[in-house]
Image: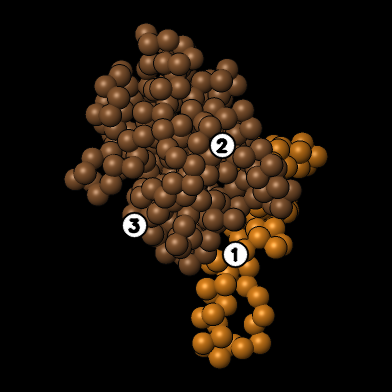
Chain colours: A orange, B brown
């Protein structure tokens, strides 16, 4: 088994209303040093394979096709074997 | 002219769309479950609003891969009329039938209101019964209607007159260039956040949605006969 941990974030420059709202709350709590907050999604996907290269290609395809929207989002992922 | 309204798990404006077509146009209209394939017997398809697949992952992202969407894409390519309203608009964006993407409203609120819109293009099958620049009142109800596209795409939309409706007085979601609805380059696939199907009787608060539907029928009769 290989576990893929995928992080999807809005691209830089795309307005993140959730992040802006959370930044405002952090400021009102006194964390005034916060200059920006960006909120993304973390996804964990388990693959029934031991072939790391194959898993990497498959996870990239999943991200491109469904898990991220390439118009507004970027993704990164890490693979962990035996998880 | 025959209309289809694909129904996804979580659609909740499907009956409104069916009733609007029945009441306004009195032509055949049928719901089509999202697992069906083959929409060849229909002349127009309306993807309804709602929360397909619970809006999980992203709005419209999971519905885009429902079996019926293959037929919707095929119908769009064949020049049939395809409309996406609210969640239907989000699905059309995810399917790549229209350019851009949808974000959460910039103020983070779910906004439910009657919204004034300006009709920007009346040369389309969906808008020919409106007057250019006319202000119409159509209900909105969405939390993720903040249309986004990059500057190159926006320039293209403007160049080819693809911006169909703009919000006036106030932009209720923060969309790029006050966009409320767009059409594809060919002019047969339209997506909009406001709900014309909820503006077809006086008792609904507005009848400005009626001409959206009459436009489609007039276009179809002119091009394909009054069968």
Relative to B202, residue B77 above or below:
above
Question: From mark 3 to mark 2, how far is it between C-alphas?
Answer: 23 Å
Q: Position of residue B31 (x, y in %)?
A: 33, 25
Residue B14 visible in the picture: no
Going 31% across and 18% down the picture, which residue do you hit?
B28
Residue B93 lies in quadrant: top right
* Chain containing the residue with disc 3: B
Please give left or right for residue B91 compared with residue A37 in the image.
left
Question: From mark 1 to mark 2, how far is it between C-alphas?
Answer: 26 Å
User: Residue most toward the left?
Assistant: B203
- The answer to which of B131 and B54 lies nearer the viewer is B131
Q: Which residue is mark 3?
A: B113
* Chain containing the residue with disc 2: B
Query: Which secondary structure lies at badge 2?
Result: strand
Query: Which secondary structure lies at badge 3?
Result: strand
Quadrant (top left/top right/bottom left/bottom right) for the N terminus of chain A: top right
Q: Which residue is mark 1?
A: A16
User: Residue most toward the bottom?
Assistant: A30
Q: Position of residue B214 (x, y in %)?
A: 36, 28
Q: Which residue is mark 2?
A: B183
């Amino acid at each position: 088994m290989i576990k893929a941990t995928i992080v999807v974030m809005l691209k830089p420059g795309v307005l993140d209303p959730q992040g802006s709202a959370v930044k405002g709350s952090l400021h009102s709590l006194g964390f005034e040093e916060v200059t920006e907050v960006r909120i993304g999604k973390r996804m964990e996907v388990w693959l029934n394979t031991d072939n790391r290269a194959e898993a990497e290609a498959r996870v990239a395809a999943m991200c491109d096709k469904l898990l991220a929207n390439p118009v507004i989002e970027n993704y990164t992922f890490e693979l962990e074997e035996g998880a | 002219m025959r209309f289809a309204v694909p129904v996804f798990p979580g659609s909740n404006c499907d009956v409104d769309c069916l009733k609007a077509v029945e009441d306004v146009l009195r032509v055949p209209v049928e719901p089509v479950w999202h697992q069906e394939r083959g929409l060849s017997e229909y002349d127009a398809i309306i993807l309804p609003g709602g929360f397909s697949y619970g809006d999980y992952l992203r709005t419209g992202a999971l519905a885009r891969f429902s079996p019926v969407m293959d037929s919707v894409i095929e119908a769009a390519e064949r020049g049939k009329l395809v409309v996406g309203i609210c969640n239907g608009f989000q699905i059309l964006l995810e399917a790549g039938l229209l350019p851009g993407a949808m974000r959460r409203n910039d103020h983070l609120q779910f906004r439910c209101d009657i919204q004034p819109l300006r009709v920007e293009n009346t040369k389309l099958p969906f808008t020919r019964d409106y007057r250019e620049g006319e202000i119409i009142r159509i209900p909105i109800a969405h939390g993720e209607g903040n249309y986004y596209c990059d500057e190159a795409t926006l320039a293209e939309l403007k160049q080819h007159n693809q911006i169909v409706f703009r919000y006036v007085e106030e932009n209720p979601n923060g969309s790029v260039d006050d966009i409320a609805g767009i059409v594809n380059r060919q002019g047969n696939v339209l997506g909009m956040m406001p709900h014309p199907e909820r503006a077809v009787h006086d008792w609904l608060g507005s009848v400005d949605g009626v001409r959206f539907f009459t436009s489609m029928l007039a276009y179809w009769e002119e091009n394909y006969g009054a069968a």
